Image (cartoon, rainbow, N blue to C red):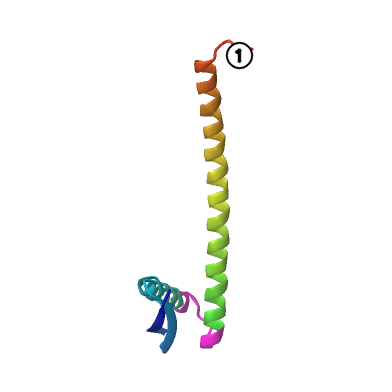
Amino acid sequence: MSQHTVTINVANKRLKIACPAGHESALLQAADEINKRLEQDAKKSHAVKTPEQALVMMSLNLANDLIQARNELTTERDKMQSKIELLQATIEQAVNPTKTA
């Protein structure tokens, strides 16, 4: 997969990033999400932070969001697996009523 350079703006800094072809949109969306979160954090926080501190806090919040999303996904996957197993057992009983006793 070929790579080329994409220019993004993060925390009021222009950055040139190597990006695989076809992933430019995702990179731009990620930069936009970072900027939105930095802006939201700046509105909430009354303490003056350096840009580095703001980026670290935003990164920690993103990591926390990712962990929560993974945990929710695991929980939902487990629930779906239980439902699938129940449906399979119900179908087995309907198809083979003499085998269940």
User: Residue 78: percent from the left, percent from the top?
Assistant: 57, 42
> Over which residues does the magenta segment extend?
40-52
Q: Is residue 84 left or right of residue 33?
A: right
Amino acid carrying label 1: it is Lys
Looking at the rendered image, the quarter that the N terminus falls into is bottom left
Residue 43 falls within the magenta-colored stretch: yes
Query: What residue is drawn where x is 54% and y is 15%?
Result: 96
> Which residue is at the far right?
101
User: Residue 15: percent from the left, percent from the top?
Assistant: 43, 88
Q: Is residue 56 left or right of residue 18?
A: right
User: Residue 20: percent from the left, percent from the top?
Assistant: 42, 75
* Viewer-nearest residue: 41 or 77: 77
> Which residue is at the far front?
1
Q: Secondary structure at mark 1?
A: loop
Q: With respect to residue 89, does 60 lie above or below?
A: below
Location of residue 26 (image quadrant): bottom left
Query: What residue is drawn where x is 56% and y is 58%?
Result: 68
Q: Is residue 44 left or right of residue 8?
A: right
Residue 48 falls within the magenta-colored stretch: yes
Location of residue 9 (image quadrant): bottom left
Looking at the rendered image, the quarter that the C terminus falls into is top right
Location of residue 66 (image quadrant): bottom right
* Viewer-nearest residue: 70 or 12: 70
Query: What residue is drawn where x is 52% and y is 39%?
Result: 80
Which residue in the structure is indicated by mark 1? 99
Q: Is residue 25 visible?
A: yes
Q: Is residue 11 visible?
A: no
Query: What residue is drawn where x is 57% and y is 49%?
Result: 74
User: Residue 40: percent from the left, percent from the top?
Assistant: 43, 74
Q: With respect to residue 62, does 68 lie above or below?
A: above
